[in-house]
């Protein structure tokens, strides 16, 4: 099967999409429309980003080159780029310094390298954790992490730690004391006072929910409460903050609108989002933002429960990836809804699967695509001729997904 690579995609996205179409059962596993030279070009672009990390790990640790390549490419990602799937890592290792024959490394081989790297890193961390006196980090923290600082800083931290505090609690207390934040409600009010008539969160970026990029239509200087803020809070949860103010800002389909005072008469060109004719009041916009943040990443049981609550009687996934993720089909008895308006990631037991597309269908419409999909769950009255319970075991739930879709997971 061929692939089409969009010019604006990042190299990691392109490699993930190509890797998702590999067919190891064919004489040539590469998909149609992509040459070996093109794959090498993409991989050498990634080599410029990550090669120095790999070289240093190989030189300074016990990890082999392939173990280091696998660990770096699976665990590190530059801002705005995707992590590589196991199949994409296999393509990278094959393309960088490959022989003239042979196939890309399979998921099984790459997973083996990843497991070896993780085992060596875990052994090294265990050694370091136990070089000090007890209690050991594993006895104190749920998820301990190594932190390196100058020795003088460590002495200062030790002096500032209370008698019943761990280092982690002391650091968190000190960081909270220096964090300057503004609530989303106060941010909206402050910009409205300065004449802003449109405020939105841009959701076009990967993992947009970790740093809220806020677009404001105004030519005014930022209010002091915003200018001095490092973070914005939503219901008390802090998020990294980035504000872009532009007096000529146009609404976009990727905008999650928090406030819109306009009448919506001018919907703009095809690249702009049609506006609500009544505008968007801050209270409604903030509720929508809370809903989006709550729904951007879900487990499969949570997704099924949301679909069921919206009236869906079944949930299926396309056998082929949609872009670099899954194509979900919630099935409804009659009228269709979108229960996953903000869903971007499905958290499976050992990986995270991007959601590339959602296509709500009726039972009759599902019949037309049934052969192109795999059923994940179906209720007793699904209307599609069968029921299918969701397994309790996370591994069994993961295995419901087609291999080609799983290969896009990170």
Image (cartoon, helix red, strand yellow):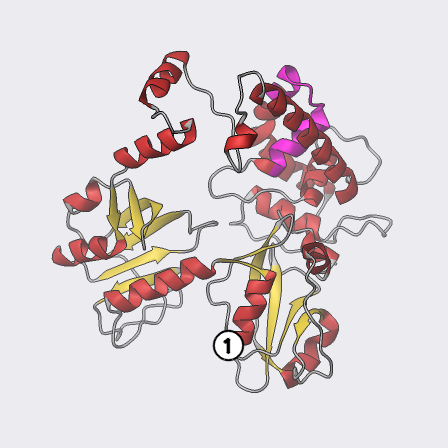
Q: x and y percent of residue 143 in the render?
A: 53, 36
| Relative to 121, residue 131 above or below | above
When the figure is inspected, residue 349 is found, relative to residue 129, above or below; the finding is below
On the image, numbered disc 1 is attached to which residue?
A: 310
Bounds of the magenta segment: 56-74
Q: Residue at x 31, y 51 (%)?
A: 236
Identify the image quadrant of residue 378: bottom right
Q: Is residue 358 visible?
A: no
Q: Relative to the observer, which residue lies in front, 47 or 222? A: 222
- Residue 69, magenta (yes or no): yes
What secondary structure characterizes most of the magenta part?
Answer: helix
Residue 357 percent across, percent down from the top left: 56, 64
With respect to residue 280, does 89 lie above or below?
above
Q: Nearer the viewer, residue 96 or 187?
A: 187
Q: Nearer the viewer, residue 283 or 274?
A: 283
- Residue at (69, 51) in percent of width and height: 407
Q: Position of residue 383 (x, y in %)?
A: 66, 85
Measuring from the top left, give residue 54's x and y in whole percent.
62, 25
Q: Secondary structure at mark 1?
A: loop
The answer to whether any part of residue 32 appears in the image is yes
What residue is at 34 percent from the left and 46 percent from the top? 238
């Amino acid at each position: 099967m061929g692939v089409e690579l969009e010019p604006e995609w990042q190299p990691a996205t392109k490699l993930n999409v190509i890797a998702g179409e590999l067919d190891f059962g064919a004489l040539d596993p590469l998909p149609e429309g992509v040459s070996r030279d093109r794959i090498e070009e993409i991989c050498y672009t990634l080599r410029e980003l990550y090669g120095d990390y790999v070289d240093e790990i190989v030189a300074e640790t016990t990890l082999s080159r392939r173990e280091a390549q696998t660990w770096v490419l699976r665990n590190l990602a530059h801002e705005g780029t995707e992590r590589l799937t196991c199949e994409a890592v296999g393509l990278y290792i094959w393309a960088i310094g490959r022989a003239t024959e042979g196939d890309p490394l399979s998921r099984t081989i790459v997973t083996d390298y990843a497991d070896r790297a993780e085992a060596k890193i875990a052994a090294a961390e265990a050694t370091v954790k136990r070089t000090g006196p007890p209690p050991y980090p594993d006895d104190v923290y749920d998820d301990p992490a190594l932190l390196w600082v100058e020795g003088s800083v460590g002495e200062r931290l030790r002096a500032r730690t209370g008698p019943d505090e761990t280092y982690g609690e002391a650091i968190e207390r000190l960081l909270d004391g220096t964090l300057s934040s503004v609530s989303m409600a106060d941010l909206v009010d402050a910009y409205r006072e300065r004449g802003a008539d449109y405020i939105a969160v841009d959701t076009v970026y990967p993992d947009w929910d970790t740093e809220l990029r806020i677009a404001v239509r105004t030519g005014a200087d930022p209010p002091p409460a915003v200018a001095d803020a490092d973070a914005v809070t939503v219901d008390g949860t802090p998020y990294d903050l980035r504000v872009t103010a532009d007096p000529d800002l146009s609404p976009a389909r990727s905008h999650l609108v928090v406030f819109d005072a306009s009448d919506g008469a001018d919907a703009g060109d095809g690249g702009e989002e049609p506006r609500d004719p009544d505008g968007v009041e801050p209270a409604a916009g903030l509720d929508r933002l809370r809903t989006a943040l709550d729904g951007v990443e879900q487990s499969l049981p949570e997704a099924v429960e949301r679909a069921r609550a919206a009236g869906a009687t079944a949930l299926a996934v396309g056998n082929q990836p949609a872009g670099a993720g899954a194509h979900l089909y919630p099935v409804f008895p009659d009228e269709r809804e979108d229960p996953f308006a903000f869903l971007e990631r499905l958290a499976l037991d050992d990986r995270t699967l991007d959601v590339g597309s959602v296509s709500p269908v009726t039972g009759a419409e599902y019949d037309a695509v049934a052969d192109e999909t795999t059923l994940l769950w179906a209720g007793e009255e699904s209307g599609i001729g069968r029921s299918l319970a969701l397994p309790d075991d996370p591994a069994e739930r993961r295995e419901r997904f087609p291999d080609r879709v799983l290969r896009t997971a990170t």
